[in-house]
Image (cartoon, rainbow, N blue to C red):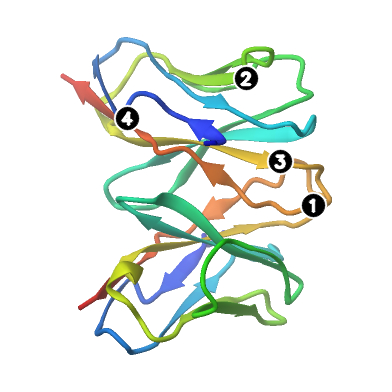
Amino acid sequence: AQKITQTQPGMFVQEKEAVTLDCTYDTSDPSYGLFWYKQPSSGEMIFLIYQGSYDQQNATEGRYSLNFQKARKSANLVISASQLGDSAMYFCAMREGPGAGSYQLTFGKGTKLSVIP
Amino acid sequence: KAGVTQTPRYLIKTRGQQVTLSCSPISGHRSVSWYQQTPGQGLQFLFEYFSETQRNKGNFPGRFSGRQFSNSRSEMNVSTLELGDSALYLCASSLGPGSGYNEQFFGPGTRLTVL
């Protein structure tokens, strides 16, 4: 079974509007972390935001926020006020286990976001 | 602070050859992970090193190997290359265990083409 599911292969959004990228995950480990990365066409993975399984509040980083619904096992990324430079692939990833363990990330298949002027 | 560097950035090899990719982590980072990215399989974990020790290995054949040096630089080697090994190989560095959520910083990748 897939551990990270991103159901939107591609999304379009108008410049200056908000967009939500979906991510659901599957784990039986009570301790885990969820990450979102952006990958422009250049290939480099850029870290955007992190949410820990025990975090009480949804994470926010500038224009990025994470809508974390633990019971539904979803961790959707919200980008507010989209910019042309936001056009890229976006990956949701999970790390399972406590901090002393492996830091292996499991990635979803990604969502290609295109921002329209 | 310099980011993660990977060399070479592009590589073309033929089937049967072997290749070595290099990764220099961010200064002070002691953990290095490697990932393979292909259009079909997406991003897959290869291995993770901390303090010169392999902590975890993904589901890849023994042709894929790696190591980490005392200065935290890491290399990965692929022997007897196959066409399916064509991919973007990404290296990520992090501080290591006990460092909060231990965000991983990725390098620009090495794009390997096997002909």
Name the residue: 73% across, 77% down.
B52
Label 1 resides on the chain identified as A
Q: Position of residue B97 (x, y in %)?
A: 80, 54
Q: Which residue is disc 1 drawn over?
A: A101
What type is the residue that disc 3 sits on? Glu
Between disc 3 and disc 4, the foreground one is 3
User: For residue A96, which numbered disc appears in the image?
Assistant: 3
Q: CA distance from mark 2 to mark 1?
A: 22 Å
Between disc 4 and disc 2, the foreground one is 2
Q: Work out whether residue B26 can be spotted.
A: no
Marks 3, 2 in one chain: yes
Q: Secondary structure at mark 2?
A: loop
Between disc 2 and disc 1, the foreground one is 2
Q: Which residue is disc 2 drawn over?
A: A73
Q: Position of residue A112 (x, y in %)?
A: 29, 32
Between disc 1 and disc 4, the foreground one is 1
Q: CA distance from mark 3 to mark 4?
A: 28 Å
Q: CA distance from mark 3 to mark 2?
A: 13 Å
- Foreground pick, B95 / B34: B34
Q: CA distance from mark 1 to mark 4?
A: 33 Å
User: For residue A86, which numbered disc appears in the image?
Assistant: 4
Name the residue: 40% across, 59% down.
B108
Residue B13 lies left or right of residue B79; in this view the side is: left
Q: Secondary structure at mark 3?
A: strand
Q: Secondary structure at mark 4?
A: helix
Q: Work out whether residue B10 can be spotted.
A: yes
Dot 3 or dot 1: first in sequence order is 3
* Residue B102 drawn above or below residue A10: below
Dot 1 or dot 4: first in sequence order is 4
Marks 3, 4 in one chain: yes
